[in-house]
Amino acid sequence: MNTTNVHTTTITDGVDNGVDVPALLAAREALSAAPEAARFQWRARTEWVNGTHSRTTVEDFSGLGTDHDHRQTFRFDADHPEVFASHDNGATPVELLLAGLGACLTAGVAAVATNRGVQLRSVTAHLDGDMDIQGILGIDRDVRNGFSNIRVRYEIDADAPRADVEAIVAQSQKRSAVFDALTNPTNVTVEVV
Amino acid sequence: MNTTNVHTTTITDGVDNGVDVPALLAAREALSAAPEAARFQWRARTEWVNGTHSRTTVEDFSGLGTDHDHRQTFRFDADHPEVFASHDNGATPVELLLAGLGACLTAGVAAVATNRGVQLRSVTAHLDGDMDIQGILGIDRDVRNGFSNIRVRYEIDADAPRADVEAIVAQSQKRSAVFDALTNPTNVTVEVV
């Protein structure tokens, strides 16, 4: 066995990115036969603290035909920064969107890399989103409230050629829930109960 | 002075929801005269931990023509749940979107209520989002990856009639960056550097 073979074995069979791809492939097969079980509902509860500061709690969701508790309760403080005359007691709500996008694409990179036999060593996504706050301040009706543009730049150290790494990132984007949620419109209803 | 007048004084002048509305109105006026300063850029950095677990760091942004550090660094762990053969070391990326939506609308409720002289006592948003995971699993190409629908239900205790509370929520929605980001498409570019 020469060095090249050892290396090939490592990246095709011995790859360990911590993603259980066989379980995911089995889930895909099982859910293909039982599409009802694929209907998930994600939940969160946001409580106003004071001013623009709020705390969101995430603890359960439904899917596979039943309710599930997360292993622990997750809490997210959000606030506006001091330049908005607020107290900066948490990230801004729009930064939470960037965090969701980075997390979704990065989980996808790990899953796709594993499925393709590529060992990852490090993955970092740098995200930025442009926003003209003339929108949210109601100064200019032609300026939208949300981001005008979002960029994600990946630095990836992996046992694969650059072209393969780019293809992994592209496949992650193609299957990303958050990428879809930001690039396509979703119906959102807001009501007072 | 009768009781009604005392009450009126309280809700129009003595309201304190912790939002500095005069500062916001001054900012609006200042930025109307200097639209360049209204261009903000929000940033986040996501680092892969293991498997589908990542950690996102939020620490600075730019706006008003310069860079700003948050008062502290905010970190968000995200992961997939155990039913996806993962370790549930953080909220899912899509739950971060719900957190961002709840936080954005709730900050807006506090700001609009204050501007309208309405004292808030408690505000809770219950959010849920439906997602058919046949999309992200690649089972059915006609199923989108993201949410099919998001609902936000507000419970609000405030010194105002229900119709006024509903109008406050509607105005918050109208000026919400995250509501816009989820209900309208945004250009997102993803690249490997």
Image (cartoon, coloured by chain):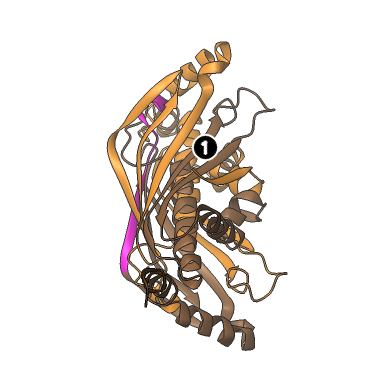
Chain colours: A brown, B orange
Q: Residue at x 49, y 56 (%)?
A: A161
Circle 1 residue: A129
Quadrant position of residue B135: bottom right
Q: Residue at x 49, y 62 (%)?
A: A108
Residue closest to the eye, B187 or A161:
A161
User: Mark 1 Cα within 10 Å, few/some/many (few <14, many 20+)?
Assistant: many
Q: Residue at x 54, y 44 (%)?
A: B178
Relative height, residue A3 to residue B115 (above, below): below
- Left or right relative to B67: residue B177: right
Q: Is residue B57 magenta?
A: no
Q: x%, y% of residue A109? A: 48, 60
From which residue to which does the magenta span run? A72-84
Could you tell me if residue B166 is visible in this image? Answer: no
As helix, strand or loop, the secondary structure at mark 1 comes to strand
Q: Amino acid at mark 1?
A: Gly
Could you tell me if residue A148 is visible in this image? Answer: yes
Look at the image and tell me in which quarter the N terminus of chain B lies. top left
